Image: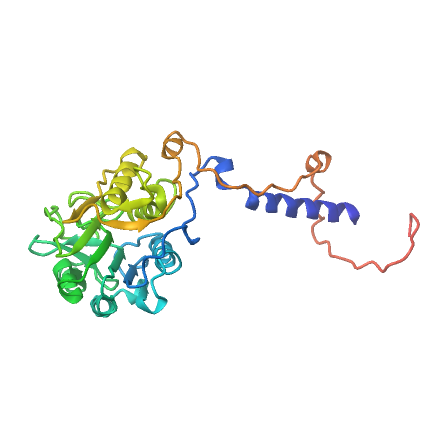
Amino acid sequence: MRTHARYTMLGLALATASLLIPSSAHGDVPVWPDLSAPPATAPDGAKDAALVIAIENYFVVPKVPGAVRNGTDWYSWLVDGRKVPVDRVTLLRNEQGSREEILKRAADAAKGVQPGGTLWVVFIGHGAPSQDASEGVLVGVDAQQTPESLYARSVRQSELASAIGAGTPTVMVLDACFSGRASRGQPIAAGLQPLLAVRSVAMAGASLLTAGQSNEFAGPLPGVDRPAFSYLVLGALRGWGDANGDGVVTAREAVDYARKALTVLPTGRSQTPQLVSAQPEQPLASHVAERGPNLAGIVSGASVARPAVAAPEVPLAVAQAPAPAAPRPGGRMVRIPAGKYTIGQ
């Protein structure tokens, strides 16, 4: 009985060990820093308002794995890092990301911006070219896989600008390309090919940060299901993108960091983030000092360092012991009363 219990405990120990060993120890995927913890940054957001839209589970069109996690990290950065009042930050996730809700919440958020403040709009999901190829559209959660439904259930960039209103200082981060393709390059709706040449629409008083050019598609980080652009820009605002070391990250620096990372990382695609802004040197974060991951190490196959949880030691003699014999067919468990016994009983 004690031998059987010992093997049971061994199995539990080995199973626990496999759960505690970091993925980098197995060499399967690179480990990216966790962005959910509040960063060390200046609390400059007292006059700001924000709208974060993260659509991962579309009703019909392909999913965007990791979109909600990225959106939640952006929400945390705005509320806990930048200190935007929580009642002026809205997070729309999955089924909440309909055309009507996006436009309504954008208008509400714009009204919440105080004099001297900034409106932050973050969209993580699918994009597509508009029907006349004049601009891009942000695909709503309930869009069907037909061009007619996609155009009817999405939000044109110009519509979003109208909902926000002229004169509202805005930083807009769009982790969506306007090629109409999903992260693996497949069209999100039949009939959107060939690709239409689309350019991001400039908005007065706005800095527009987009995931790529119109003939490219936005995709995930290598080795993990998380949209790359919104993750890298958020990392840049925590300090990774501070190229000159002055403790301030500008719109140009944030996009440059994401572009550099997506150029050197083994993503298997071409993705070139863009900045459309009349003020490319606009500060987006200050008093930052966080260092980013070792991109060269990721490219060469190394992982980003993180504390490892030691696996419990298993005695070698026990680990190599032969497995107990299987019970005979038809056998049944018998409960043996406690007491002293001699051989033969």
Q: Nearer the viewer, residue 297 or 266?
A: 297
Q: Measured along the vertical axis of the image, is residue 243 above or below residue 189?
A: above
Horizontal side, residue 85 vs residue 173: left or right: right
Quadrant of res 30: top left
Q: Nearer the viewer, residue 44 or 329?
A: 44
Q: Quadrant of residue 20?
A: top right
Q: Position of residue 45 (x, y in %)?
A: 32, 60
Residue 233 position (above or below residue 94) = above
- Residue in the picture at 77% in, 45% down: 3
Q: Position of residue 184 (x, y in %)?
A: 27, 44
Residue 215 located left or right of residue 330: left
The image position of residue 18, as x and y in percent, is 57, 43
Using the image as rendered, state which of residue 136 and residue 253 is in the foreground. 253
Q: Is residue 10 left or right of residue 266?
A: right
Q: How is the image coloured?
A: rainbow
Looking at the rendering, which quadrant does residue 68 occupy? bottom left
- On the question of residue 149 being in view, the answer is no
Q: Is residue 160 visible?
A: yes
Exactly how many numbered labels are in the figure? 0
- Residue 106: percent from left, percent from top: 22, 66
